[in-house]
Image (tube, rainbow, N blue to C red):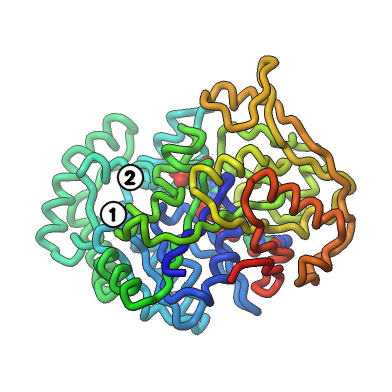
Amino acid sequence: MPASVLVGTQWGDEGKGKVTDLIATDFDLVCRYAGGANAGHTVIVGDTQLALHQIPSGIMYEGTTSLIGNGCIVDPAVVLDEMDTLESQGISCDDLKISGNAHIVMPYHKDLDGAHEKRLGKNLIGTTKRGVGPTYMDKMNRTGLRVQDMLDEKIFREKLEAALAYTNPTLELVYGLPTYTVDQICETYLGYAERIRPHICESSRLLNTALDEGKNVLFEGAQATMLDIDHGTYPFVTSSNCTAGGAVTGSGVGPTQIERVLGVAKAYLTRVGSGPFPTELPEGDYAGDLLGKVGHEFGVTTGRKRRCGWYDAVVVNYAARVNGLTDLAITKLDVLGCLEKIKVCVAYECDGVRYDTVPEHQSVFYHATPIYEEMDGWMCDISGIREFDQLPQEAKDYIELLEGLANTRVSIITVGPERDQTINRSWS
Ligand code: GDP
Ligand code: IMO
Ligand code: MG
């Protein structure tokens, strides 16, 4: 298994952190390839519980190299803070690598993110305010600063001066915000640079050398298919290619290296932020409220309450197509143990037309009414089960239904947040 990709199939928070940590044992190197500190990946190992925003979840597995690839954006303050937290828990960050080509999140990117959201009013995206959109805007505009620029003060100052020449007027004249001076930013960022320096690498070379040596590489996706800038519910998306294709451009390996693509899907559905969500259950709905409560559905990055709804098989089937999934991991199956009846959306209806796939036009998706298949729940605690055959029949039926609808083998099922609360059906 030279290289595998792990990717979110819904709107994020599927449990990618837990599944990455779980399968990291099979890999020598774990690489994040897209997104920045907007991710919130929870990893629980024994008494240690961490929410990682920038550093790959593979860091928790001793002996695994962790790499932040060129497709990511890097907030140095967050990286250093996470390194300190990890080290204080006895987890070494000596083997953390950061691509020199990754773009840096600057303080003004965060200001612009917040100000733009405010300006959007009721049409806001509901971003994490981590500066993601504005940092990727600067990248695409070719006005961004990269991690490697931090290595040379002269270059850093020159590029920053050029960036501030147009960013300051935007801050001041468009949004009425305070501006920045080069010295002000240099003071903090050049301090970060000293600590970041030993970790900077050439992502493509590091990965391809590892692959040539027969090592196994896992690409850890952040965000998810429906938040992808090209394939998600635009404009209610993040600003990167979080789908499996992003693993190639976001790291510098060729597509032929990727053998397996593991999609992670929650056994029900959540979304944080704005945008369409056909199977959403309204506040006050018995099942929706229970899912939120039992599943502890609060954002790891922003603490916001996640919107909850039924599993949408149309979305996961779409994710199977867009990412070329070879395997599925179904997470949080234990949470459904509180419901007598469980619904699965198998298609949509809009203006009298049935849609078996995600509609091409966003306005159709917005107005889509789910067509459900209802199943009996199992109404018991399954968190101690480790073998598929020992699951209650209703839970087995549920998994087999999802498998058929996604046309993808369910290889992993998780039944609790801890590393060992897992059923490994066919992942090896
Ligand atoms: P990620 O962003 O995809 O890594 O997911 P998050 O960490 O944001 O959210 C998943 C949440 O569910 C975390 O609090 C996990 O500890 C928790 N979790 C993961 N797998 C399971 C599971 O099988 N059962 C339960 N009850 N919780 C889980
Ligand atoms: P993980 O990796 C869930 C959502 C935000 C917002 C939109 C754009 O933990 O699954 P951004 O700050 O990226 O510009 O926000 O995307 N979003 C996430 N939702 N999980 C995430 O990451 C997310 N990262 C971004 O809520 O709707
Ligand atoms: Mg998360």
Give the residue pinned by disc 1: 103
Corner quadrant of residue 188: bottom left
* Camera-side residue of 104 and 270: 270
In the image, 374 versus 381, the foreground residue is: 374
Mark 2 element type: helix
Q: Viewer-proximal residue, 216 or 283? A: 216
Q: Is 30 displayed left or right of 17 in the figure?
A: left
Report which residue position mark 2 lands on: 136
In the image, is 175 to the left or to the right of 301?
Answer: left
Using a 10 Å C-alpha cutoff, classify the residue at mark 2 as few (fewer than 14 neighbours), some (14 to 19) or many (20 or more).
many
For image coordinates 77% across by 66% down, the residue present is: 388
Q: Judge whether residue 264 can be spotted in this image.
A: yes
Q: What residue lies at 59% left-to-right and 65% top-to-bottom?
A: 19
The percent position of residue 194, horizontal first and vertical second, equals 24, 73
In this rendering, is residue 133 above or below 40? Answer: above
Q: Position of residue 420 (x, y in %)?
A: 68, 74
Q: Are marks 2 and 1 in contact (CB under 8 Å)?
A: yes
The mark total stands at 2
Q: Amino acid at mark 2?
A: Tyr
| Within-10-Å neighbours for mark 1: few <14, some 14–19, many 20+ | many
